[in-house]
Structures are given as C-alpha cells and as structure tokens.
Image (cartoon, rainbow, N blue to C red):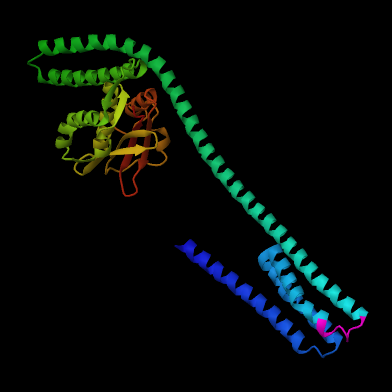
Amino acid sequence: MQSYKLDLKNRHRVYFDFLIISVVIIILTVIHYTTYHYTMNYHIMLQFAYYLPVIYAAMRFGLVGGIISGLSITLLILPFMTYFNTMAMASSAMLTQWVEIGLINGIGWLTGFLIEQERKASRKHQLALQIQKELVEKLKRESLERERLQREIRQTERLTALGHLSAGLAHEIRNPLGIMKVSIQLLAQDKREDREVLEYCRVLLEECERLNRLVSEFLSFARPKELVREKIKLGKLLEEGVSLIQPALRQHRIKLSQTREQVDDCVVEVDSDQIKQVILNILLNAIDAQREGGRILLEGIQQEDFVGFAVSDEGRGIPPDILPYIYDPFFTTKEKGTGLGLSVVHRILDQHSGKIFVSNRSERGTRVEILLPPS
C-alpha cells in the first residue's frame, strides 16, 4: 500500500513538472510573438530565459527532457525568426539568434546527458552498497556457522577422548563394585538384629547402586551400540516416551500439555530405542528443572529439512554463562547429576544427523528443540 502511494506521488510530480516546463516555454514564446516590434537586443535577451526550462527539463527528465524541450523551443520560435523579423533583422542578428537556438539545444542535450551519467553512477553506487551490505551479512552468517561447527568439532573431540577413557575405567570399577555390593548384602544378613549396622549397609548399598548407574552411563556413552534404523512415525515415539514419564509427572504434580499434531504422522528413519532415550532425557530434565507443580509444553516443530519436537519448562532457566558448556561431559548443576545426559543426547543426535538447540524462554524457563531429518 505504501509503495502504491509513493508511485502515485511520483506520477503526480512528473505531471506537475511537465506542466510547469510547458507553461514557462509557452509564456516566453507568447511574449516573443506579442512584442515582435521590440528591438532585436530585447528578443536576444528574452531568448536567454529559455535556458531555465531547458535546463530544468534536462535535470528532471534526463537526456530525453533536454532534447524534447530544446526541439520544442526551436519549433515554436522558428516562425518568429523566419517570417516576422526577416526584413528587420540584420544578417549578424539573424546569425546570433540561430547560434542562441543552437546553444539552447546544446545546453539541454549536454545537461541531460550529464544528469543521466550522474544517475547511472548513483545507481551503481547504490548497487555496490547493497552488494557490500549483503556480503557483510553473508560473512556474519558464515562466521556464526563456522563458530558453531568449531564448537561441535571441539565437543566431538571431547566426547571421543572421554569415550576411550570411560570404557577402560568403567570396566575396572564395575568388578570391585560388584564384590563390594555382595559383601555388604552378606554383612546385612549376618547383622540383621543390629539396626545401626543395617542402616550403614543400606546407605552403602544405595551408593553402590548410584555408582553402578554412573558406570552404566559411562559404558553407554563410551561404547554406543550400532544403530538399528527403522522407519517409524515421530508421534509413536513421542507417545511412548510420554507414557514412561507419567509416574514422574504425577509425583511432582506437573501438567504436560501437548501440541504435536503437525508432526505425529511425520516418518523418521531412526534407532527407536536411542531416540526414545533422547525423549526421556529431555522430558526428565524438564521435570527436574520444574521441581514441583507448573506445566511442561511438548510441541511438534518443523524447520526447513527437519522435523522434531520442542520441550518448554517453567523452571529458572539456564544462566547465559553456563549455556556453552551444557553438552560437556560431567558438567552438571544438579546435586546428584552425572553430567552425561545432554552429552549422550548430543551424541545420539549426531549419529542420526540431527540437531539440538537449548535456549532460555523470554518469560521464564528453558526451551529445548530436537530436530531430525525426515525419512
């Protein structure tokens, strides 16, 4: 609408300028014809006034304006020069008038030509500025993409190094851990009547279980199993993941809202067990961030060549200075966390050519987006 108004305004300006130029030329010509009996010097001086409309026409309409206005003046003044003053004019005066007419046309053409050259140069300059701006924006995008790729490379290198370390360490820990667990259980059976010993045994067994879970996560992280891909609807994976966390939702009195109809029928070719592990990790992280009460939103998303889901919680969010490190192994802000949850998610998605994006919501809480290539 605004563009249409500008076009209409420009069109009115063109009509107005054309009218002004025409009126000025006609008025000067009428003065010539109505004062034909005045001296020749008067008419020569009057002809100087033609420069004004000619120059303005050239400046406004370019070379075409200069040529048309010059030729129009020539055609209008030609009868005056030929018939009215033929007898009264000396040959030198007649030559002066013809030279003046030639100069009027020449000035109009030259001014129009120079104006068009200046406009072309201005357009080239504007085009160069536009290209420069686009190049700067492209360089910024490429720089951001390069930084993202470098972060992913560093993340992969850290995960690879940790994987090799964890594999050996986990096996070395698991065997003595199993012996400790059996020994504690036997001690608890022998000292059934000693409540103090039983309490110590219970605490030791809990810690053994926690260490065993940690070792299992190390092994899962260090030696990921080979992908067993199958084509499956994303909605089915999400439904199975949601059903597994229902007890945790009820325990913490959290409501789960879902708006994923747009992706339920989208088919992805993935290892369903590993993607369900991703779904569980993300939903459980949201529950941990939420603690008690509130609402978690699970929504389907589609972006360019990807399909996936987003989980938004109403927790405290993630401090901006921590965000760059959330995928690092062992990095955690939880009291009992291992710091491997998002690292495992990142590795699984990397194997599936997927993506993960974590950001703080504008109001409160965190939003995690999981994207997978559709089948």
Q: Residue 281: x, y in percent? A: 28, 29
Is the N terminus in the top left, top right, bottom left or bottom right quadrant?
A: bottom left
Q: For residue 66, what is the image quadrant?
A: bottom right
Q: Compared to 230, does 116 lie above or below?
A: below
For the point 33% across and 17% down, the residue is 227
Q: Between 156 and 197, which is closer to the camera in this rendering?
A: 156
At horizontal 78% and vertical 69% (from top left) the residue drawn is 105
Q: In terms of depth relative to the viewer, which is nearer, 5 or 172?
A: 5
Vertical placement of residue 76 versus 355, above or below: below
Q: Residue furthest left?
A: 193
Residue 346 x %, y %: 37, 27
Check residue 86 for magenta coloring: yes
Query: What is the magenta range?
Result: 83-90
Left or right, 103 with reference to 182: right
Residue 7 visible here:
yes
The image shows residue 100 at horizontal and vertical percentages of 83, 74
Quarter residue 123 falls in: bottom right
In-front residue for pair 163/353? 353
Check the picture and name the quadrant holding the C terminus: top left
By secondary structure, the bulk of the magenta-drawn segment is best described as loop
Q: Residue at x 74, y 70 (%)?
A: 71
